[in-house]
C-alpha cells in the first residue's frame, strides 16, 4: 500500500540520493544506485540495487518501496517494469540549473519537506548569483568541456551554464540544448579552430589523461595545450545534475578558470 509522504524510497541515480541526505531525510532511502558516492557514507549505509541502465528488479521489490526515483529516458525500461507491477515511480529529467533547482523543490514537496527544500535551493541560487557577479568583472577565457573522448562529446547543458556563471565562455554552448550525446559530438578540427584557453574534461568514470589530450594531432597549437591548462573534473562533481554540480562542481570550474600567475602579473 502506497503512502504519503513516502517512507521507503529507492534512488536509481546519485543526485536524488544526495538531495535526500542534504534534506536530512536519508532514513527514507532503502536502496541506491551503485554510482551513489555522495555523501561518502552512503556506500556503507545503503544497499546498491542498480547501475545506470540496469537494475535488480527483484531486489528493488524486496525492499517494498513506496517510491522509486529515476532519471532520463535511459531508465525508461526500468521505470516501466516497476510501474507494471504497481510501484510508484517518479522520473526526473533535469537538464539545466533551473531544472536541478526544480528537482530539489519537487522532491522536497514529495516527501513533505517543501520549506526545507526551498531553503536549500535559495542557498544555491544566492551562491551562483554571487559567483556570476564577481565573474562579470574579469576577462572570459574560452573553454572546451569534454564529456567523453572517443568520440569527443561536449556541450552538456548544465555544465555549459556553470562555465558561463564561473566566468568562462563555452566554445560549444550552441550544443547545450541537445539532450542526446550523439547530437553533441565534435571534431578535433572544430576544437582546434575554436582555440580554447582552458580545457576541462570529465570522462564519466574513466580517468582523464591530460597528456593524451595534449598529444592529439594538431592540438599543440591550442592555447590551452600550450599553457598546460587541461584540468580533470571528477564525474561525480559535474556529470550528475544535482547538488554536487552546484557546489563542488562549480568550485572545481572556478579553480580551473582562475587566472594563472603570469596572467595577473
Image (tube, rainbow, N blue to C red):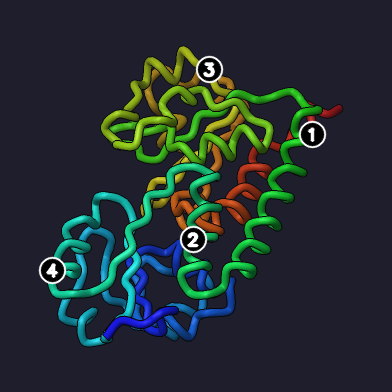
Element carrying mark 4: helix
Tell us which disc is closer to us: 3 or 1. 3
Q: Specify the quadrant that holds the C terminus.
A: top right
Q: How many marks?
A: 4
Q: Earlier in the sequence, mark 1 or mark 2?
A: 2
Alpha carbons under labels 3 and 1: distance apart: 21 Å
Q: Is residue 54 left or right of residue 212?
A: left
Q: Earlier in the sequence, mark 3 or mark 1?
A: 3
Q: What residue is disc 1 on?
A: 261
Question: Which label was assigned to residue 84?
Answer: 4
Residue 30: x and y, percent? Answer: 37, 83
Element carrying mark 1: helix
Residue 38: x and y, percent? Answer: 50, 69
Q: Residue at x 21, y 69 (%)?
A: 55
Q: Residue at x 54, y 45 (%)?
A: 98
Q: Earlier in the sequence, mark 3 or mark 4?
A: 4
In this view, 132 is above or below 2:
above
Question: Marks 3 and 2: CB-CB under 8 Å?
Answer: no
Element carrying mark 2: helix
Nearest the viewer among 162 and 117 is 117
Q: Specify the quadrant that holds the N terminus.
A: bottom left
Alpha carbons under labels 3 and 2: distance apart: 40 Å
Q: Earlier in the sequence, mark 3 or mark 2?
A: 2
Q: What residue is disc 3 on?
A: 195
Amino acid at each position: 500500500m502506497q503512502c504519503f509522504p513516502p517512507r521507503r524510497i529507492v534512488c536509481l541515480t546519485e543526485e536524488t540520493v544526495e538531495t535526500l541526505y542534504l534534506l536530512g531525510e536519508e532514513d527514507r532511502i532503502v536502496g541506491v544506485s551503485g554510482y551513489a558516492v555522495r555523501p561518502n557514507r552512503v556506500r556503507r549505509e545503503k544497499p546498491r540495487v542498480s547501475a545506470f541502465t540496469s537494475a535488480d528488479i527483484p531486489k528493488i521489490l524486496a525492499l517494498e518501496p513506496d517510491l522509486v526515483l529515476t532519471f532520463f529516458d535511459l531508465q525508461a525500461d526500468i521505470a516501466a517494469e516497476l510501474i507494471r507491477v504497481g510501484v510508484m515511480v517518479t522520473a526526473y529529467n533535469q537538464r539545466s540549473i533551473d531544472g536541478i533547482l526544480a528537482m530539489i523543490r519537487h522532491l522536497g514537496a514529495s516527501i513533505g519537506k517543501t520549506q526545507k527544500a526551498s531553503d536549500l535551493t535559495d542557498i544555491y541560487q544566492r551562491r551562483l548569483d554571487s559567483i556570476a557577479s564577481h565573474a562579470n568583472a574579469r576577462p572570459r577565457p574560452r573553454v572546451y568541456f569534454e564529456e567523453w573522448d572517443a568520440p569527443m562529446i561536449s556541450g552538456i547543458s548544465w555544465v555549459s551554464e556553470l562555465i558561463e556563471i564561473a566566468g568562462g565562455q563555452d566554445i560549444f554552448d550552441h550544443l547545450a540544448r541537445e539532450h542526446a550525446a550523439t547530437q553533441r559530438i565534435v571534431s578535433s578540427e572544430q576544437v582546434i579552430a575554436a582555440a580554447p584557453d582552458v580545457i576541462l574534461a570529465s570522462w564519466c568514470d574513466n580517468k582523464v589523461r591530460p597528456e593524451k589530450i595534449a598529444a592529439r594531432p594538431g592540438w599543440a597549437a591550442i592555447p590551452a595545450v600550450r599553457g598546460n591548462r587541461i584540468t580533470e573534473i571528477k564525474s561525480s562533481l559535474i556529470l550528475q545534475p544535482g547538488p554536487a554540480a552546484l557546489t563542488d562542481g562549480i568550485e572545481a570550474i572556478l579553480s580551473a578558470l582562475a587566472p594563472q600567475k603570469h596572467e595577473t602579473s
